[in-house]
Amino acid sequence: MTQIIVLSVVILGSIGAISAVVLYFVSQKFKVYEDPKIAIIADILPGANCGGCGYAGCQALAEAIVKKGTTEGISCPVGGESVKKQIAEAMGEVAGETIPQRVIVRCNGTFENAPKKYNYDSITSCAYAHMLGAGESACAYGCLGLGDCVKACSFNSIKIDTTTGLPAVNYETCVLCGACVRACPRNIIEIRNIVEGNSIWVSCMNKEKGVEAKKNCKVACIACRKCEKTCEFEAVAVENNLAFIDSTKCTACMKCVAACPTGAILTMLKEEAKA
């Protein structure tokens, strides 16, 4: 009996030893090396995991930066300049200048400018309402005002203004994560470069001809091309019955604003954004 017990112990011990050796070699064979810089950069990042950088989260962003070997073309909108400089330092780089940006809403179809043609009484979702039809103002391109952008914002930086029916952005808390941009089914929310401290944009997305566009909104772009002809820097172009201002060419001279007969071009001064 004693011999059987001893033999059993020896066999089990041998199996355990062999298994340990096999597991060791397997672990060495398939071991994944993680660059220590990944952990360093992940610690620098704010941990918001908002997806504003274009990656699944802060860990994924850190891995992408280290894999690429540079911070060029990759940034954390939530962290801003401070985080950008710290990451660049960790990567042995000098942080480049960041172009200031701002979230803008390319629709001015307020209750006054684009009166309701009917009452929507269904699921409170812009995405759902967009699939059903043009919306209460009958403009198939304008803001639906049901707040998908509000629900998408993790920083409570956007709300629906009950006076206008349009999204209003709090620029003091907005981190430019882009969640509201992705949530809008009509693509009217945009992140634009700030020119000379100002934001200038065509606050209309209607691609119908002028007469049709004006039927539903009195401040719609009518594609008259006056803004395009006025601009000396080729920053304004009219395509598909709609004007667009290229913020990379715009010098904020404001001539297009004065030239627009419907008031479709809006501006926001640096001082106004702080208010």
Image (cartoon, rainbow, N blue to C red):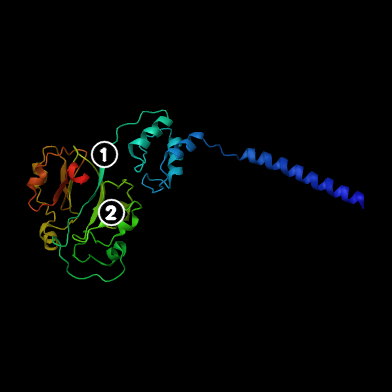
Which circle, 2 or 1, is nearer the viewer?
Answer: 2
Q: Which residue is mark 2?
A: 158
Nearer to me, 161 or 129: 161
Nearer to me, 155 or 128: 155
Name the amino acid type tagged 2: Ile
- Residue 65: name its quadrant: top left
Q: Residue at point 43% right, 33% down?
A: 69
Label 2 element class: strand
Ranked by sequence position, the earlier of labels 2 and 1 is 1
Crowding at dot 1, Cα within 10 Å, few <14 / some 14-19 / many 20+, comes out as: few
Q: Residue furthest front?
A: 275
Nearer to me, 24 or 76: 76
Q: From the viewer's perspective, tell me whether residue 72 is left or right of residue 144.
A: right
Residue 184 point in image, percent of width and height:
29, 56
Residue 47 point in image, percent of width and height:
42, 45
Q: From the viewer's perspective, tell me whether residue 33 is left or right of residue 82.
A: right
Can residue 72 be spotted in the picture?
no
Residue 203 point in image, percent of width and height:
17, 52
Give the total number of marks visible in the rendering: 2
Q: Which residue is mark 1?
A: 100
Can residue 218 be spotted in the picture?
yes
Q: Residue at point 19% right, 39% down?
A: 197
